Image: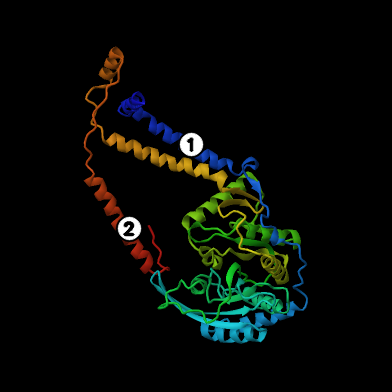
Amino acid sequence: MPRLLSTALSLRQDPRVLKAPPYISFICILVGFAWLLMLPLDEYSRRTYISENALLPGQVHTYFGGSEENVLRAYREEVDTLRDADNYSINNHVEVMLKNIGLKVGRQNYTYHSAGEVLNGENVYGILQAPRGDATEAIVLVAAWKNTADAVNRNGVALAMTLARYFKRWSLWSKDIILVIPPDSKSGTQAWVDAYHDAHDPNKVAPLPIKSGALQGALAIDYPFDNKFESLHIVYDGTNGQLPNLDLINSIVNIAGGQMGIDTGIQDLEKHANNYQDRLQTIFRGMLRQGLGYSTGPHSCFIPYHVDAVTLQPRGEGWHDEMAMGRVVEGTFRSLNNLLEHLHQSFFFYLLMHKDRFVSIGTYLPSAMLLAANFSIMAIFLWVKSGQPPAPLKEKDFKSKSATRGVSISTPAVERDLFLPCAVVVLGHALSTIPLYLFNNLSAKVRFYC
């Protein structure tokens, strides 16, 4: 053991050892990127599957349709009459309509100061009490009055209210159903979710007058246009890179594609050919959105509270109408209604490359670890190198003497001056408060031009 320690110490002081880290770091980068580029191949990815057997997606017959189309038209006309009204006038009418359906209705005021703007409004929501439940669990249906593009969610709000009226007639629900209609897709939904979990600021967000049980899942509808659609886009990216349970996405894909014949898409890729290029593009788009960590829809507000949620957006022009969209929501709610516990069996860390294929964390994590190891290796290398003085001998003299004597010439370590690097690090962290202040106080409409 003493001989082993002495050998290790001699290697640590050997100048030739310092030549290896840059090459090792380059190899880590090269292998890490090569690993990432191999993920779209069939050998390194898997087909999606349902882990939670209780979901039973697509196993029930959906009945939404027929006369419900006339009800949807009536609600859509009500939405059209309120298009130019203010938030409180809209909520007055919506409250009356929800009470006529038979829901318990609550309203909530909120005020946020963000990006130099004051975001205030009032949420309105209704709770459908489950005939076979005890108000310990609930499912949420969100239909914001305006979507993320600031367009009136005309069909989305009308469809959500039609579904609430339709659900009220069924006695099979074991979980409460909550219909939330915020004035916008982000701040209103965030205020409602925060208050539901008692995580709100009482000075800015009002508490909820009525509540139900633990939220088991949430579904948001973003359907602003009138024409029939071709495919259904699933938006699932949450804030700070968080993702919903993969079983929820797989269930929607199964219900929409297998039962309704509706094509589904992800990551804003309209025509996915399921080839290597499209798979790689989908993976990179997902990684970019997770890295940026911003909210992509109303569903993003639920995921930090461990509530699996997605947003459904009809895309294109086809032959599927609002009734088909409603049957997808009905089938998804029927599946969530079957759950005996929170979704937990499937993956929370994954990269989707296609609606039917994904990469689990165990497959893509080595790539990230290799890329991260590069920084650690180079940091240790520079730290060790900074503690050694300049070589006193030229390269030729070093080679000749080491060859004649057969031993390596070691150099003693020197004292490191840490004041300057520590000052640079502290100053860099202090200067970061400037963009933080600007981002929190400048208006979101301000654009910077080079």
- Mark before the other along the chain sequence, 1 or 2: 1
Q: In the picture, which quadrant includes the C terminus?
A: bottom left
Q: Amino acid at mark 1?
A: Leu
Q: Residue furthest top?
A: 404
- Image quadrant where residue 402 sits: top left
Rate crowding at label 2 as few (under 14), some (14 to 19) or many (20 or more) other CA atoms within 10 Å. Answer: few
Which residue, given by chain and number where applicable, does mark 2 sit on?
Answer: 432
Q: Marks 1 and 2, how far apart in space?
A: 32 Å
Label annotation for residue 30: 1
Q: Position of residue 108 (x, y in %)?
A: 50, 80
Q: Is residue 132 above or below residue 447?
A: below
* Pick the front one: 205 or 442: 205
Res 196 visible: yes
394 on left or right of 341:
left
- Image quadrant where residue 327 sits: bottom right
Q: Amino acid at mark 2?
A: Ser
* Pick the front one: 304 or 24: 304
Rate crowding at label 1 as few (under 14), some (14 to 19) or many (20 or more) other CA atoms within 10 Å. Answer: some
Quick one: SS at disc 1? helix
